[in-house]
Structure formats: structure tokens, C-alpha cells
Amino acid sequence: MIAIGVDNVARIYQKYSARHRFQTFKSAIVKGDIFKALKPDELVTALDGVSFKVEEGQTFGIIGENGSGKSTLLKVIAGIAKPTRGRVSVRGKVSALIELGAGFHPEITGRENIYINGIMLGLSRKEIVQKFDEIVRFAELEGFIDAPVKTYSSGMYMRLGFSIAINVNPDILLIDEVLAVGDASFVPKCLDKIDDFRRRQKTILFVSHDLSTVEKICDRAIWLKEGRIEKMGEPKRVVDSYLQDVLDKQEVEFEERQKAVDKEQEWEEERRENRWGKREIEITKVRLKGLDGKEKHVFSPDEGMIVEMDMMTSQRIKDFVFGLGIFNSQGIYCYGTNTKLEEYEPLSIEGEGKVICQMKKLNLINGTYYLDVAVHKKDGYPFDYHRNLYSFLVSSLHKDEGITRPEHTWSFSEGIKVKPPKDR
Amino acid sequence: MFRNLKEIYKYRVLIQSLVGRELKARYRGTILGFLWSFFNPLLLMIVYTIVFGFIIRPRDPAFEGSPWLYALFLFCGVLPWTWFSSSSLDSANVLMIHGNLIKKILFPAEILPIVAVSSNLIHFLFGLPILFIFVPIFGKAYTPYIFFLPLVILIQFVFSLGFAFLLSSLTVHFRDIKDILANFLTFWFFASPIVYPITFSTIQESSFLKVFLNLNPMTHIMQGYQNCVFFGTLPHWKKLGVTFALALFLFFLGYYVFDRLRDSFPEEV
């Protein structure tokens, strides 16, 4: 059974320019163009040709960047906004968690707000009476329910909003990123409630930036990009290709930033404090590459990295050590090595050449890292030392902490029961 | 459009509770609470009585020179006028104030101006007992024509609703309607026979004023109140009938404009 059918939906927003916004009623009448003033003069396409179906009982994820049309899509399905083109069909009662507590009136009590908000969301007075205690209990507001809502903290406000909306007992639940604002204890409770919904074979449409939750709870997912469906299908695949896209974007941004930095540095070449040494041996260029040999600056923790140094020297030198060091954004020294530590015995160096260090797997956590490269004598006398001149980004779904990410697995003996995450 | 109108009926419980909320919220934190619904018109009447009754003595023969009778007459008009003007002012703001309802939940926007007019209607109804008490005190007798009062109220309700639809939807696009409206309402107040009876000699002698006043629908609504409460006569059937038709026309026109602009609300409020 199809619960939600979205058929070739487009939503075009009308944008009224500043001129119109500040136009006055008087001038509209005087100029006689009152109807023209009511016409939009710019159109913004928020959704374009979006089609998909959601089966009853499915949990359906929607991901995408900010401004990709996710919320608009949810609003169209909820009936708050009308599609400009196309059709939306929905089977069953819909409850939309788009903004929690949207209809609350600050001056009246939580109790009164529950009644009014409940009615707005489609409950009858009788149903609200029945569910009243449950709503209050879930929101953990037993002691405050007769206080005006304006005295609530934002967390209390949100909990009450969520509690009402979830107790409307809809057939279809639309959730828009509302869990992002909850505190540490309330979010798991909400997720439990959502799980409960899934068990009862209710349909859930879930918009989130929390990709791992999307992977975890959704049966299917779509990725919206600039108002169009970029990919649809199994959540892991959709999330992965979305991530790839994000990485590519970061790569481009990073390169641009790097270029800007490089330019600046060339200009200040001589004065720069981050490079020292007499340059008897000079590192002329440093490139970061993926294992495939393509230059890049954004890596996943499971990826390898190649550091390629171009060097040149005008003399023949017998005592030299090449090294590199990795620092994170807090300046913590994460890793360092050199050819001396690894017992490569220098014999001789002259002319131009390349030194390549290949790391099979980075195993670093999320974050920006800075790279030191250097060539010096065995006793530490520097030829050319580059301090933090190069940087790269590690970007991943993992939420782990610390510095490095050793490869690992968990296992449990009998008697310890855990629910493993969905395979990723 | 008509289907949407029908939908409104389904939302009557919501309208009820929103009106209740409006009334509760308005006097929340005040000591007198609901009593303000009585005191506001009462204080207003006292001021008008002092100024127009005692300082500027009523000249019209209808008041037999009595400031008390004049005060009563004044009250017949000021009370419903207050209803009309505050519902208009409220509805000019109402879509913006409750913008997050329109933007964030599935909510029929037309409910908001309806609630604005209705909650002010309740205030008006709370003020009526004061009027009723003062009728015999100030020496007027009730006539059976008092039973036409609900009809006049109905006409004003429909008229106010139409006006409210128009105001609320247009203000979304033209924010300065709010400011224009405040001034316009003052003008309208004096252009309606509220502080003076339409039988006033100056008006009857000027054909321009007579025509002008007769073109104002509020004239006939105010006269309706004055006739059935103060003068104890039959309201002017024909004029009131035409006013009713006009009110209905305004209602549908207002709703039509509102309906046409509806889709622009979520983006503009």
C-alpha cells in the first residue's frame, strides 16, 4: 500500500523584490498598479520534478544540503505549501514535526496550550482529555503544566511540542530536523518513540542532517540536490554518494583556500617564519595525493595518502634526513617520522629529485590537519624546514574522539546483549 | 473558494478555542481580568458623557437636553463601533502575529481574521449588559424592537468579517495599511452617526452630508442599534436590508481576495 505518493512535484517560490516589499499601499493606488504590485517578479525553484513513493510502514529518509528543498518537500507533503506543479497524495492522518510548539501562545498555561495545539493538529477535545496525562508525562512537565508557557525553558517548550505532536497518533509522521535541538536525555527518548512508531508499522518521513541516524533507522532514502532527486534507494548507498559529493565540494573549497594562501605566501616568501634553514637542500614543492595519484586535500580515515616532495640541491651532500610530521588543529603532534628514525642510511644526494612517502591508511579522526616536512642533517641542522605549511582535511561519518582511529571491532561474550548498528 | 468556505465550518472547535485563548491571554496578569470587558466601555462612556454631555451640551431635541440620555445614545453607538474598530485593527495584524502558524503547521489562515472579529464580538457582548442596565436607569423604556438587536449584530458581524479578510490579506503585502487604517477609522468614526444622531438639524439641512452619510454602511448599522435600543423603534428595513446585502458582498469579496492571496502568505508574513 502506498502511503505517500509524490508525482512530478515542483514548487516555485515567488520572490518579491525589495522594491515591492517597501512599496506602500498608497503609492500602489496612486500609480494604479496595485495588481502589478501583488505579482511576484522573481521565481525561485525550490523543488523540480520530484517523484517518489513511500510504502506504508516504511521509514523514509531525506537528506541534502541546506537549501536543497528538503523542508519545502515536507511542507508540500504536509499540505502547508501547495505544489506549483505535480500531485501529492497522502493516505491517512499526517502529523508534521516541522517546528515544535509553533502554535503555542506564551501568555497561557501549558495545559491550555496542549488543548489548543492538539486541536490545531487535528485531535478532538475528547481525545486530548484522554491523552493529556501521557502528553504531560512524556514531556516531563508535571510540575509546570499550569504555568504560562512563556516561563518555560526552550527545552521544556520543545519537549511539550514534540510530545503533543507525537501523541496525535498519526498514520504518517513527518519529522524535520527537530531532534537536533534536544538535550542528551530527551533525544534518545524521542528516537525510542520513533522506533515505537516503526514497530507499529506507521509511515515516517525523516529529514535530517544526521546521516548516521538516517542510515540507522530508514528503510529507503532520497538525496535532494538543488530541488531535484539526485539519488534514491537503499539508505547506505544514498548517504555514501551524498558524502562523496560533500567531499568533492570540500576538496574544491579546500583547493581554493589553499590557492589563496599560497599566493599570499609567495609574496611574503622571505619573511615567513614557518620556514627556515639555509636551503643547501631545498624542498621546492609539496603535493598531497590520494593513493590513485590524484592530488587531493580531503580524505576519509580509511584512505591512504601520498606526500610527494620535490627537492633540489646545488651541491653533493652526504648527510641528509627527510621527515614529516602531522599536527591537528589544536597543534597536537599526532604523528611524526623521518628517514633516520626508520634507519634509511643516507649515501648521497645531488641535483633534483622526488621524495615520496606513502601512507596506506590515515586512520585519523575527523578534522583539519597540518603537515610539517623537512630535510635536515642527522644531528638536526636544518637545510629546509616547512612548519605547518600544508594542510588536509579528514572527513568521516564516525563520531569517535581522540586523535587516531586504530582499526577495530567489538565483540561480546555470551550474556552481554547488544543490538549491533546496521552494517556500514 | 466555496469549498474552502465550507472547510471553515469544520474548524469551528478550533475557532472556539482560539477565541477562548485570545480572551484569556488578553487579561492574563491583570487584577480585574474579565471585568475589563465591562470597565473599558464603561470608562469610555463616562468620558464621552462628561465631554459631550456636560461640557458640550447636547442640542438635539431627541435628548430633551439631558446629558444622561445623550450618554445612553452615545453608548449605543460607541459599543458596537469599538467592536468594529478593534476587530479591524486586530485583523490587520493577525496574519503577521501568527505567522508561524501559517508557516509551520497545516493551518487554515482564514481562521485568524475570524478569530480576531469573534473575540472582539465577545467583548462587545460582555459590554451589552451595561447598556441594558443603563437603559431603564437613564429613563428609557424597552420596546419589543429590542429583539431586532441580534439581527443588527449579525449584519455587523458579516460586514466586519469581510473587511477583516480584506485587511488581513492585503496587509501582508502592504504593511502600511495598519497605519493608514488607524487614521481612517478615526475619520470613519466621525463620519458615522455615533456622537450625533442622523436626525441632527445640521445634517438634515445639508443634502451633501445626508447623501454622504447614507452611503456609509456603518451609518445604517449604527442607526440599527440606536433604533432598537435607544429610540425603541423599528429599524429602517430597507436601508438595513441593503446594508446586509452589501455586507454579504464585502464578505465574499474579502474572502475572494484572501483566497487568491493565500498561497503567498507563508512566504510573506
Image (cartoon, rainbow, N blue to C red):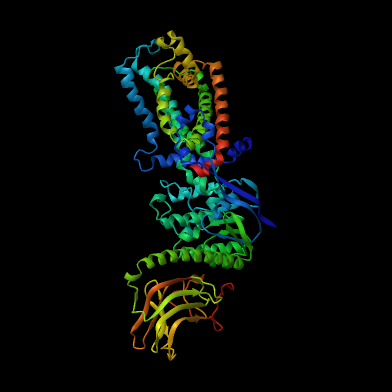
The residue lying furthest to the left in this view is B55
Identify the image quadrant of the C terminus of chain A. Answer: bottom right
Picture quadrant where residue A314 is located? bottom left
- Asked if B243 appears above or below B168 in the picture, the reply is above
Front residue of A201 and B33: A201
Quarter of the N terminus of chain A within the rendering: bottom right
In this rendered view, identify the residue nearer to me: A350 or B212: A350
- Residue A74 position within the rendered picture, expressed as x and y whole percent measured from the top left: 57, 53
In the rendered view, would you say B79 is above or below A403?
Answer: above
Does A142 sit left or right of A94 as displayed?
A: left
State whether residue A368 appears in this view.
no
Of residue A305 and residue B25, the one placed in the foreground of this image is: A305
What residue do we see at 40% from left, 51% from top? A147
In the rendered view, tell whether residue A125 sits above or below residue A317. Answer: above
Tally of numbered tags: 0
Residue B5 location (% of width, % of height): 60, 36
Nearest to the observer: residue A403 or residue A337: A337
Percent from the top left, x then y, of residue B265?
52, 41
Q: Residue at x 55, y 49 (%)?
A: A121
Q: Which of the 4 image quadrants contains residue B23? A: top left
**Residue B11 x %, y %:** 57, 41
Q: Is residue A152 visible?
A: yes
- What residue occupies the far right of the structure in this picture? A1
Q: Is residue A264 above or below residue A416?
A: above
